[in-house]
Amino acid sequence: METSEQVEHSENSEHSEHGATRTLGRSGIQVSALGFGCWAIGGEWQRPDGQPLGWGKVDDEESVRAIRRALDLGVTFFDTADAYGTGHSERLLGRALGKRRDEVVVATKWGNLFDEHTRTADGQDDSPAHARRALTASLERLGTDHIDLYQFHMNDGDPERAAELRELCEEFVREGLIRSYGWSTDDAERAAVFAEGPHCTAVQHAMNLLQDAPEIVALCEKLNLASVNRSPLAMGLLTGKHTAGKRLEAGDIRSAPPAWLPGFTEGTGADADWLGRVESLRDILTSEGRTLAQGALAWLWARSPRTVPIPGFRSVAQAEENAGALAKGPLTAGQMAEIDQVLGR
Protein backbone atom coordinates (compact mmCIF):
# COMPACT_ATOMS: atom_id res chain seq x y z
CA MET A 1 0.00 0.00 0.00
CA GLU A 2 1.27 3.49 -0.86
CA THR A 3 1.90 5.92 1.96
CA SER A 4 0.27 9.36 1.77
CA GLU A 5 3.69 10.82 0.94
CA GLN A 6 4.11 8.39 -1.96
CA VAL A 7 0.63 9.22 -3.25
CA GLU A 8 1.42 12.93 -3.12
CA HIS A 9 4.66 12.36 -4.98
CA SER A 10 2.84 10.44 -7.72
CA GLU A 11 0.22 13.17 -8.03
CA ASN A 12 2.80 15.92 -8.50
CA SER A 13 5.49 14.05 -10.41
CA GLU A 14 5.38 12.03 -13.59
CA HIS A 15 8.11 10.19 -15.44
CA SER A 16 9.16 11.25 -18.90
CA GLU A 17 11.59 9.58 -21.26
CA HIS A 18 14.53 11.16 -19.43
CA GLY A 19 13.23 11.26 -15.86
CA ALA A 20 10.70 12.97 -13.65
CA THR A 21 8.60 16.00 -14.44
CA ARG A 22 6.82 18.24 -11.96
CA THR A 23 4.00 20.76 -12.11
CA LEU A 24 5.01 24.37 -11.54
CA GLY A 25 2.59 25.16 -8.76
CA ARG A 26 -0.91 26.41 -9.61
CA SER A 27 0.04 27.23 -13.18
CA GLY A 28 -0.33 23.65 -14.40
CA ILE A 29 2.88 24.20 -16.40
CA GLN A 30 4.89 20.98 -16.65
CA VAL A 31 8.66 21.23 -16.16
CA SER A 32 11.48 18.76 -15.76
CA ALA A 33 11.98 17.99 -12.06
CA LEU A 34 15.41 19.54 -12.50
CA GLY A 35 15.89 23.08 -13.75
CA PHE A 36 19.14 24.76 -14.71
CA GLY A 37 20.20 28.00 -13.01
CA CYS A 38 21.89 30.51 -15.30
CA TRP A 39 23.65 32.79 -12.81
CA ALA A 40 27.15 31.34 -13.38
CA ILE A 41 27.03 31.53 -17.18
CA GLY A 42 26.48 35.29 -16.94
CA GLY A 43 30.22 35.61 -16.44
CA GLU A 44 32.02 38.26 -14.42
CA TRP A 45 30.24 41.31 -13.01
CA GLN A 46 30.59 43.31 -9.83
CA ARG A 47 29.36 46.01 -7.49
CA PRO A 48 30.79 49.55 -7.75
CA ASP A 49 33.19 48.76 -4.88
CA GLY A 50 34.62 45.82 -6.82
CA GLN A 51 32.83 43.04 -4.90
CA PRO A 52 32.49 40.20 -7.43
CA LEU A 53 28.94 39.06 -8.16
CA GLY A 54 29.66 36.37 -10.72
CA TRP A 55 31.35 32.98 -10.56
CA GLY A 56 34.46 33.94 -12.49
CA LYS A 57 35.37 33.65 -16.16
CA VAL A 58 33.20 31.60 -18.48
CA ASP A 59 33.39 30.36 -22.06
CA ASP A 60 30.21 31.51 -23.81
CA GLU A 61 30.41 28.86 -26.51
CA GLU A 62 30.76 26.13 -23.89
CA SER A 63 27.74 27.60 -22.06
CA VAL A 64 25.66 27.43 -25.24
CA ARG A 65 26.74 23.82 -25.82
CA ALA A 66 25.84 22.98 -22.21
CA ILE A 67 22.34 24.47 -22.52
CA ARG A 68 21.68 22.57 -25.74
CA ARG A 69 23.02 19.36 -24.21
CA ALA A 70 20.70 19.84 -21.23
CA LEU A 71 17.76 20.18 -23.63
CA ASP A 72 18.70 16.91 -25.28
CA LEU A 73 18.85 15.26 -21.85
CA GLY A 74 15.31 16.31 -20.94
CA VAL A 75 15.83 19.55 -19.01
CA THR A 76 12.96 21.90 -19.86
CA PHE A 77 13.24 24.61 -17.16
CA PHE A 78 15.84 27.39 -17.23
CA ASP A 79 16.08 30.12 -14.60
CA THR A 80 17.97 33.38 -15.10
CA ALA A 81 17.72 37.04 -14.04
CA ASP A 82 18.20 40.33 -15.83
CA ALA A 83 21.06 41.18 -13.45
CA TYR A 84 23.09 37.99 -14.00
CA GLY A 85 26.14 39.15 -15.88
CA THR A 86 24.25 42.46 -16.24
CA GLY A 87 22.08 41.11 -19.03
CA HIS A 88 24.59 38.67 -20.47
CA SER A 89 22.97 35.53 -19.04
CA GLU A 90 19.62 36.38 -20.62
CA ARG A 91 21.21 37.12 -23.99
CA LEU A 92 23.18 33.87 -23.88
CA LEU A 93 20.16 31.78 -22.89
CA GLY A 94 18.08 33.32 -25.66
CA ARG A 95 20.79 32.54 -28.20
CA ALA A 96 21.25 28.97 -26.99
CA LEU A 97 17.53 28.18 -27.06
CA GLY A 98 16.94 29.72 -30.48
CA LYS A 99 14.15 27.93 -32.33
CA ARG A 100 13.71 25.53 -29.39
CA ARG A 101 12.28 28.28 -27.17
CA ASP A 102 8.80 26.74 -27.22
CA GLU A 103 10.18 23.43 -25.87
CA VAL A 104 11.13 25.01 -22.54
CA VAL A 105 9.89 27.03 -19.59
CA VAL A 106 11.89 30.22 -19.07
CA ALA A 107 12.05 32.03 -15.73
CA THR A 108 13.74 35.36 -15.14
CA LYS A 109 13.74 38.07 -12.46
CA TRP A 110 13.66 41.83 -12.01
CA GLY A 111 14.37 44.43 -9.34
CA ASN A 112 18.12 45.12 -9.61
CA LEU A 113 19.76 48.01 -11.44
CA PHE A 114 22.86 47.51 -13.55
CA ASP A 115 24.96 48.85 -16.42
CA GLU A 116 25.57 46.35 -19.21
CA HIS A 117 28.57 48.27 -20.57
CA THR A 118 30.54 48.44 -17.32
CA ARG A 119 29.13 45.09 -16.07
CA THR A 120 28.32 46.77 -12.77
CA ALA A 121 25.25 46.32 -10.57
CA ASP A 122 24.24 49.28 -8.46
CA GLY A 123 21.07 49.48 -6.42
CA GLN A 124 17.52 48.24 -6.70
CA ASP A 125 14.21 49.63 -7.93
CA ASP A 126 10.86 48.28 -6.77
CA SER A 127 8.72 50.76 -8.68
CA PRO A 128 5.99 49.54 -11.04
CA ALA A 129 7.47 51.69 -13.80
CA HIS A 130 10.81 49.90 -13.49
CA ALA A 131 9.10 46.50 -13.48
CA ARG A 132 7.55 47.21 -16.86
CA ARG A 133 10.81 48.58 -18.28
CA ALA A 134 12.68 45.55 -16.97
CA LEU A 135 10.18 43.11 -18.45
CA THR A 136 10.40 44.78 -21.86
CA ALA A 137 14.20 44.61 -21.73
CA SER A 138 14.24 40.96 -20.64
CA LEU A 139 11.91 39.96 -23.47
CA GLU A 140 14.28 41.64 -25.92
CA ARG A 141 17.43 40.05 -24.49
CA LEU A 142 15.84 36.60 -24.36
CA GLY A 143 14.44 36.95 -27.89
CA THR A 144 10.94 35.90 -26.86
CA ASP A 145 7.44 37.38 -26.65
CA HIS A 146 6.64 36.05 -23.17
CA ILE A 147 8.22 34.94 -19.89
CA ASP A 148 6.84 31.76 -18.34
CA LEU A 149 7.76 32.65 -14.73
CA TYR A 150 8.57 36.26 -13.80
CA GLN A 151 10.09 36.71 -10.34
CA PHE A 152 10.60 39.70 -8.04
CA HIS A 153 14.34 39.68 -7.24
CA MET A 154 14.47 41.62 -3.96
CA ASN A 155 14.81 39.17 -1.07
CA ASP A 156 13.75 41.68 1.59
CA GLY A 157 11.45 43.85 -0.53
CA ASP A 158 8.73 45.92 1.11
CA PRO A 159 5.50 43.86 1.48
CA GLU A 160 3.22 46.86 0.77
CA ARG A 161 5.03 47.64 -2.46
CA ALA A 162 5.02 43.92 -3.25
CA ALA A 163 1.21 43.91 -3.14
CA GLU A 164 1.29 46.64 -5.79
CA LEU A 165 3.72 44.64 -7.89
CA ARG A 166 1.57 41.52 -7.52
CA GLU A 167 -1.34 43.37 -9.12
CA LEU A 168 0.99 44.62 -11.86
CA CYS A 169 2.06 41.04 -12.54
CA GLU A 170 -1.60 40.13 -12.94
CA GLU A 171 -1.77 42.88 -15.58
CA PHE A 172 1.27 41.38 -17.31
CA VAL A 173 -0.54 38.01 -17.39
CA ARG A 174 -3.65 39.61 -18.92
CA GLU A 175 -1.45 41.29 -21.54
CA GLY A 176 0.12 37.94 -22.45
CA LEU A 177 3.63 39.09 -21.49
CA ILE A 178 4.05 36.52 -18.71
CA ARG A 179 2.31 33.24 -17.85
CA SER A 180 2.92 33.26 -14.10
CA TYR A 181 4.97 35.02 -11.44
CA GLY A 182 6.63 34.56 -8.04
CA TRP A 183 8.98 36.11 -5.50
CA SER A 184 12.63 35.17 -5.03
CA THR A 185 12.78 35.46 -1.24
CA ASP A 186 13.80 33.44 1.79
CA ASP A 187 10.99 34.97 3.88
CA ALA A 188 7.76 32.95 4.01
CA GLU A 189 5.67 35.93 5.12
CA ARG A 190 6.82 37.97 2.13
CA ALA A 191 6.20 35.05 -0.22
CA ALA A 192 2.65 34.78 1.13
CA VAL A 193 1.93 38.35 -0.02
CA PHE A 194 2.58 37.43 -3.64
CA ALA A 195 0.74 34.13 -3.18
CA GLU A 196 -2.54 36.05 -2.82
CA GLY A 197 -2.48 36.60 -6.58
CA PRO A 198 -4.17 33.86 -8.65
CA HIS A 199 -1.27 33.59 -11.12
CA CYS A 200 1.46 33.47 -8.48
CA THR A 201 2.86 29.97 -8.84
CA ALA A 202 6.31 29.78 -7.21
CA VAL A 203 8.70 30.89 -4.51
CA GLN A 204 12.39 30.81 -5.34
CA HIS A 205 14.49 30.35 -2.21
CA ALA A 206 17.76 28.96 -0.94
CA MET A 207 17.59 25.30 0.08
CA ASN A 208 19.89 22.31 0.15
CA LEU A 209 20.43 19.40 2.49
CA LEU A 210 22.74 21.53 4.68
CA GLN A 211 20.28 24.45 4.75
CA ASP A 212 16.67 23.33 5.01
CA ALA A 213 13.79 25.81 4.58
CA PRO A 214 10.83 24.26 6.42
CA GLU A 215 8.67 27.42 6.59
CA ILE A 216 8.75 28.07 2.86
CA VAL A 217 8.30 24.40 1.97
CA ALA A 218 5.24 24.30 4.23
CA LEU A 219 3.88 27.45 2.56
CA CYS A 220 4.38 25.94 -0.91
CA GLU A 221 2.63 22.72 0.07
CA LYS A 222 -0.27 24.59 1.70
CA LEU A 223 -0.84 27.05 -1.16
CA ASN A 224 0.08 24.85 -4.15
CA LEU A 225 3.22 26.75 -5.11
CA ALA A 226 6.42 25.43 -6.64
CA SER A 227 9.49 25.53 -4.40
CA VAL A 228 12.24 26.58 -6.81
CA ASN A 229 15.51 25.80 -5.05
CA ARG A 230 18.51 28.03 -5.62
CA SER A 231 21.85 26.98 -4.10
CA PRO A 232 20.76 23.31 -4.29
CA LEU A 233 24.42 22.27 -4.23
CA ALA A 234 25.37 24.81 -1.52
CA MET A 235 27.26 27.00 -4.01
CA GLY A 236 29.37 23.99 -5.04
CA LEU A 237 30.13 22.54 -1.59
CA LEU A 238 27.94 19.53 -2.35
CA THR A 239 29.78 18.64 -5.54
CA GLY A 240 32.86 17.27 -3.77
CA LYS A 241 35.11 19.47 -5.88
CA HIS A 242 36.20 21.89 -3.13
CA THR A 243 38.94 21.41 -0.55
CA ALA A 244 39.69 23.50 2.53
CA GLY A 245 42.31 26.19 2.04
CA LYS A 246 42.09 26.22 -1.77
CA ARG A 247 41.80 29.81 -2.92
CA LEU A 248 39.22 30.71 -5.55
CA GLU A 249 39.82 33.00 -8.51
CA ALA A 250 39.39 36.71 -7.84
CA GLY A 251 36.29 37.15 -10.03
CA ASP A 252 34.35 34.47 -8.14
CA ILE A 253 31.82 35.74 -5.57
CA ARG A 254 32.86 32.88 -3.27
CA SER A 255 36.41 34.31 -3.06
CA ALA A 256 35.06 37.32 -1.13
CA PRO A 257 31.72 36.01 0.13
CA PRO A 258 29.06 38.48 1.27
CA ALA A 259 27.33 37.90 4.62
CA TRP A 260 24.47 35.94 3.04
CA LEU A 261 26.81 33.34 1.52
CA PRO A 262 27.82 30.75 4.16
CA GLY A 263 30.33 27.94 3.75
CA PHE A 264 33.16 30.04 2.30
CA THR A 265 35.68 32.41 3.87
CA GLU A 266 37.61 35.22 2.23
CA GLY A 267 41.01 34.16 0.97
CA THR A 268 40.78 30.52 2.06
CA GLY A 269 37.91 29.14 -0.01
CA ALA A 270 35.56 26.47 1.34
CA ASP A 271 35.01 26.29 5.09
CA ALA A 272 36.46 23.11 6.65
CA ASP A 273 33.45 22.56 8.95
CA TRP A 274 31.03 22.63 6.04
CA LEU A 275 33.22 20.26 4.04
CA GLY A 276 33.33 17.92 7.02
CA ARG A 277 29.52 17.74 7.08
CA VAL A 278 29.47 16.95 3.37
CA GLU A 279 32.06 14.20 3.84
CA SER A 280 30.00 12.63 6.65
CA LEU A 281 27.13 12.21 4.17
CA ARG A 282 29.14 10.95 1.21
CA ASP A 283 28.26 7.26 1.53
CA ILE A 284 24.52 7.93 1.71
CA LEU A 285 24.48 10.45 -1.13
CA THR A 286 26.57 8.36 -3.50
CA SER A 287 24.42 5.24 -3.12
CA GLU A 288 22.83 3.63 -6.19
CA GLY A 289 25.71 4.90 -8.33
CA ARG A 290 25.00 8.61 -7.82
CA THR A 291 27.67 11.26 -7.74
CA LEU A 292 27.71 13.50 -4.66
CA ALA A 293 25.91 16.27 -6.55
CA GLN A 294 23.26 13.85 -7.84
CA GLY A 295 22.66 12.68 -4.27
CA ALA A 296 22.19 16.26 -3.10
CA LEU A 297 19.59 16.82 -5.83
CA ALA A 298 17.90 13.54 -4.89
CA TRP A 299 17.56 14.83 -1.31
CA LEU A 300 15.65 17.88 -2.58
CA TRP A 301 13.23 15.76 -4.61
CA ALA A 302 12.57 13.58 -1.58
CA ARG A 303 12.11 16.63 0.64
CA SER A 304 8.84 17.65 -1.03
CA PRO A 305 6.89 16.96 -4.24
CA ARG A 306 6.90 20.75 -4.81
CA THR A 307 10.66 21.17 -5.18
CA VAL A 308 12.42 22.03 -8.43
CA PRO A 309 16.18 22.45 -7.83
CA ILE A 310 18.08 24.72 -10.22
CA PRO A 311 21.82 23.96 -9.98
CA GLY A 312 24.21 26.19 -11.86
CA PHE A 313 26.57 24.99 -14.59
CA ARG A 314 29.47 26.23 -16.68
CA SER A 315 30.31 23.23 -18.83
CA VAL A 316 28.81 20.36 -20.80
CA ALA A 317 30.25 17.94 -18.23
CA GLN A 318 28.41 19.69 -15.39
CA ALA A 319 25.21 19.75 -17.44
CA GLU A 320 25.48 16.01 -18.07
CA GLU A 321 26.18 15.21 -14.41
CA ASN A 322 23.28 17.31 -13.13
CA ALA A 323 20.84 16.03 -15.74
CA GLY A 324 21.93 12.47 -14.95
CA ALA A 325 20.27 12.82 -11.55
CA LEU A 326 16.83 12.80 -13.21
CA ALA A 327 16.94 9.10 -14.04
CA LYS A 328 17.92 8.13 -10.49
CA GLY A 329 15.04 9.93 -8.75
CA PRO A 330 14.65 10.92 -5.08
CA LEU A 331 16.29 9.38 -2.03
CA THR A 332 14.26 6.91 0.03
CA ALA A 333 12.57 7.78 3.33
CA GLY A 334 15.18 5.64 5.07
CA GLN A 335 18.05 7.57 3.51
CA MET A 336 16.40 10.88 4.44
CA ALA A 337 16.10 9.75 8.06
CA GLU A 338 19.73 8.61 8.06
CA ILE A 339 20.86 12.03 6.81
CA ASP A 340 18.89 13.77 9.56
CA GLN A 341 20.53 11.49 12.11
CA VAL A 342 24.04 12.22 10.82
CA LEU A 343 23.35 15.97 10.86
CA GLY A 344 21.74 15.78 14.31
CA ARG A 345 18.35 17.16 13.35
Image (cartoon, grey):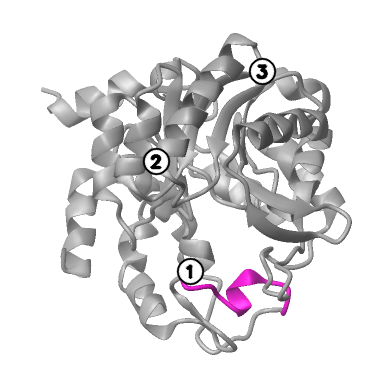
List the residue tagged with mark 3.
177
Q: Which mark is residue 159?
A: 2
Where residue 20 sits: x, y (%)? 45, 29
Magenta stretch, main secondary structure class = loop
Answer whether residue 117 is magenta in the image.
no
Answer whether residue 258 is magenta in the image.
yes
Report the amino acid beneath label 1.
Leu
Report the amino acid beneath label 2.
Pro
Q: Is residue 127 above or below residue 198?
A: below
C-alpha distance separating marks 2 and 3: 24 Å
User: Which residue does the image show at 36% across and 67% down from the upper left?
Assistant: 282
Where residue 93 sits: x, y (%)? 76, 38
Q: Which mark is residue 158?
A: none
List the residue tagged with mark 1.
261
Residue range highlighted in magenta: 250-260
Left/right of residue 180 with respect to residue 144 in the rendered view: left
- Res 55 → quadrant: bottom right
- Res 142 → quadrant: top right
